[in-house]
């Protein structure tokens, strides 16, 4: 198969950075909106079954699933950062081999991790406050979805690699396919086949298979696929991959840990509070899809320019992202405010669930500006050779930035205080994250960033020892 030379060009080292950020973010956001909209549809369909415990079961299950998804995202961050940097250094063959090895290592790890989670579902759901029939429903749902974790990892990592190549449209198509498949199968499995909550889980499994298949097909079709299997090469690449993947995984696991604490405290105020938090958890990524998308879009832009030694463009990309976050969040908050009643009505939310939705869909959600700062900061750390910075920032956000705020919020304002505390804690962490990123970019410009894999080697994060071992 012949491939055009342009397929491997580093697209982000030239051209208007704002345009690159907006193009990458919008295409990713379209895919994310589709995927998250399906999650919303899941919740809507489940609420239509008229069983009170189902929405709460989705909330508990979502916390566990967030943890498994975080592992896949961690591997995707490693793969995306390495591919982008290799392309920036004009080494496409290294990018291909690294992607292959990230996928192999990731699938093995995902299979082991999924097995551990599967065998401890009752303990884990009990730990976050699930009891009785609600726990049984959550466990049944998870038993179907957890085994598909390795398949999901393949789709997420391959999609991230497409973004690192600058193929924003193809990455969008991958996510759209997953969303469309899930949207079509959800009502069929839930209502037509009368599978209920389990039907929603099986629809998600098929969706993950479709996402992985399409992503891999694009990688093979457009970017020369994968390298040959070599255990020595995998062993050689394991350390540098782990140097990014492990801190990225640890960083991403922090969010579900913090989320688990939030759900546990909310559960003290009844299943209506848990259902309200679950609905907010589905509304949030749809409303703020561009923030999620931008954090994934800015990584390849920073990575390619860092690999090419264009540090001024790295800093410009970061700073312009900050401005775009503010420009985006403010009008979204206004829209949420005027739609708060409609959102609550769609999910037939009453009592505390409705109160929480009304609280979120107002000025409180302006706090997403600060979450966006944290997301962009993490992308900068991961692509500038300091992934452990994102680990510390995320854990800080989900411990010191969650536990005391949620605890005291619950004491003073009840279930609403849980949500207030969750949102407020991010402000202080975001300030730290911003200045830490600025400091790191200054060090990068002065060639003071050392390779965390081989600290005495030199100033670049990778090309690391692998490139020199290959020569």
Image (tube, grey):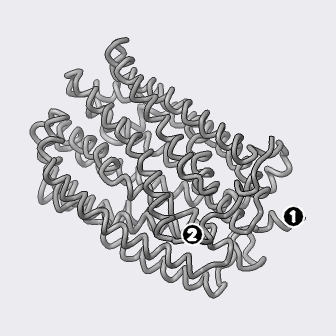
Between 418 and 1, the residue placed more toward the observer is 1
Please tell me whether mark 2 sits on a helix, a strand or a loop. Answer: helix
Q: Residue 132: give x, y in percent of width and height.
A: 28, 26
Estimate the spatial distance between the alpha carbons at disc 1 and disc 2, rounded to whole Å.
Answer: 25 Å
Q: Nearer the viewer, mark 1 or mark 2?
A: 2
Q: Residue furthest right?
A: 471
Does residue 10 appear anywhere in the picture? yes
Mark before the other along the chain sequence, 1 or 2: 2
The residue that appears at 67% across and 60% down in the rendered structure is 82
Q: Is residue 78 visible?
A: no
Q: Image check: 68 left or right of 258?
A: right
Dividing the picture into quarters, in which one does residue 216 lie? top right
Relative to 466, residue 436 above or below:
below
- Outermost residue toward the left in this view: 351
Q: Quadrant of residue 278?
A: top left
Q: Position of residue 220 (x, y in %)?
A: 71, 41
Q: Which residue is mark 1?
A: 469
Towards the viewer: 165 or 82: 165
Where residue 46 sits: x, y (%)?
Answer: 28, 26
Q: Residue at x 62, y 51 (%)?
A: 161
Q: Determine the secondary structure under disc 1.
A: helix
- Figure quadrant of residue 217: top right
Q: Quadrant of the image for the C terminus?
A: bottom right
């Amino acid at each position: 198969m012949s491939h055009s030379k342009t397929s491997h060009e580093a697209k982000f080292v030239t051209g208007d950075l704002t345009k690159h950020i907006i193009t990458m973010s919008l295409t990713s956001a379209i895919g994310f909106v589709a995927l998250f909209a399906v999650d919303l549809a899941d919740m809507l369909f489940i609420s239509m079954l008229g069983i009170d415990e189902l929405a709460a079961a989705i909330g508990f299950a979502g916390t566990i699933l967030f943890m498994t998804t975080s592992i896949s995202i961690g591997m995707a961050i490693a793969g995306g950062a390495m591919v982008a940097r290799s392309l920036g250094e004009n080494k496409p063959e290294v990018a291909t081999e690294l992607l292959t090895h990230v996928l192999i290592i990731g699938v093995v790890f995902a299979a082991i991790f999924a097995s551990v989670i599967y065998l401890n579902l009752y303990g884990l759901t009990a730990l976050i406050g699930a009891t009785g029939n609600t726990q049984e429903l959550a466990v049944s749902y998870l038993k179907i979805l957890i085994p598909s974790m390795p398949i999901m990892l393949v789709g997420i990592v391959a999609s991230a690699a497409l973004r690192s190549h600058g193929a924003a449209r193809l990455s969008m198509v991958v996510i759209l396919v997953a969303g469309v498949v899930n949207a079509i199968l959800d009502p069929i499995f839930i209502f037509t086949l009368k599978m209920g909550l389990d039907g929603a889980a099986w629809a998600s499994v098929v969706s993950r298979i479709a996402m992985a298949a399409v992503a891999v097909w694009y990688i093979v079709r457009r970017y020369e696929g994968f390298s040959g299997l070599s255990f020595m090469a995998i062993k050689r690449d394991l350390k540098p991959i782990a140097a990014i993947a492990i801190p990225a995984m640890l960083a991403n696991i922090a969010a579900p840990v913090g989320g688990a604490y939030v759900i546990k405290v909310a559960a003290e105020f009844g299943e209506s509070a848990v259902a309200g938090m679950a609905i907010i958890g589905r509304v949030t990524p749809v409303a703020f899809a561009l923030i999620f998308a931008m954090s994934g879009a800015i990584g390849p832009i920073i990575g390619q320019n860092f690999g090419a030694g264009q540090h001024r463009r790295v800093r410009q990309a970061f700073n312009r992202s900050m401005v775009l976050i503010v420009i985006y969040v403010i009008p979204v908050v206004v829209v949420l405010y005027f739609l708060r009643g409609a959102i609550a009505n769609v999910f037939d939310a009453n009592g505390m669930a409705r109160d929480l939705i009304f609280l979120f869909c107002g000025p409180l959600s302006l706090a997403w500006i600060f979450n966006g700062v944290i997301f962009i900061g993490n992308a900068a750390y991961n692509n500038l050779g300091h992934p452990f910075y994102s680990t510390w920032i995320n854990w800080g956000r989900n411990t010191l930035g969650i536990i005391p705020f949620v605890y005291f919020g619950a004491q003073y304002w009840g279930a609403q205080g849980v949500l207030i505390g969750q949102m407020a804690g991010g402000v202080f962490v975001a300030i730290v994250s911003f200045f830490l990123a600025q400091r790191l970019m200054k060090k990068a410009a002065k060639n003071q960033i050392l390779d965390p894999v081989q600290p005495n080697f030199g100033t670049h994060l990778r090309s690391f020892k692998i490139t020199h071992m290959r020569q």
